[in-house]
Amino acid sequence: MTDIRPHEIRVPVPNPDDARLYFIGRIHTPWTDRKDCPRQGKPDGPECRVEIFEPWVPALKGIEDYERIELLYWLDRARRDLVVQNPGHSDSTFGTFALRSPVRPNPIGTSLVTLVAVDGPILTVRGLDCLDGTALVDVKPDRCAFTPKAPPKP
């Protein structure tokens, strides 16, 4: 990845050797090219599927009690070497940590999505902004909803 916009700054990136992630699932969206992917997910966006892999399926117990959940995912197709970026929608430059760009040293994406349905290991959600096939790192209830919307089912 050598293409950079004017005024962007690239740094050499060391080989990662300190983090071990378990991809717990796969995200299925309509987008296969970054140029087609929305900049931010929208609550009225298309329904997308989040597939949870074994042995993590039992960890979904109770998730259906939440209206919104947070997904953390690994942006495996994003570059990792820019410390200053020139977003395509702006004439200004910004430090990577001042942007929600997928280009990050550790390309972890987050989306707060609406949970539409739970069917076994499949979550149907609205509000995603990632490419089809993106690896899922974690699922959490909405950070503002510390308790489920209804009492837990026995």
Image (cartoon, rainbow, N blue to C red):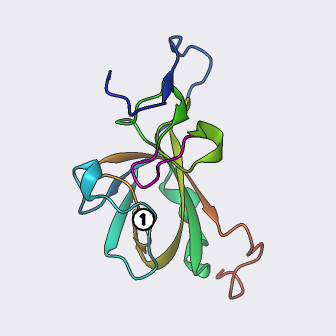
Mark 1 burial class by Cα count in 10 Å: few <14, some 14-19, many 20+: many
Q: Quadrant of residue 153?
A: bottom right
Q: Amino acid at mark 1?
A: Leu
- The magenta region covers 87-93
Give 51 or 7, whichever is nearer the viewer.
7
Q: Main secondary structure of the magenta part?
A: loop
Give 70 or 22, whichever is nearer the viewer.
70
- How many numbered dots are placed on residues in this image? 1
Q: Is residue 118 above or below residue 84?
A: below
Q: Residue at x 48, y 56 (%)?
A: 57
* Left or right for 85, reference 98: left
Q: Residue at x 31, y 52 (%)?
A: 131
Q: Is residue 71 above or below residue 91?
A: below
Residue 8: give x, y in percent of width and height.
48, 30
- Say which quadrant the C terminus sits in: bottom right
- Say which quadrant the N terminus sits in: top left
Query: Residue farthest to the bottom?
Result: 150
Q: Secondary structure at mark 1?
A: loop
Q: Quadrant of residue 148?
A: bottom right
Residue 62: give x, y in percent of width and height.
61, 72
Q: Residue at x 33, y 68 (%)?
A: 48
Q: Is residue 148 visible?
A: yes
Q: Is residue 54 visible?
A: no
Residue 11 magenta:
no
Give 16 or 51, whichever is nearer the viewer.
16
Q: Residue at x 23, y 63 (%)?
A: 30
Q: Which residue is label 1 attached to?
A: 128
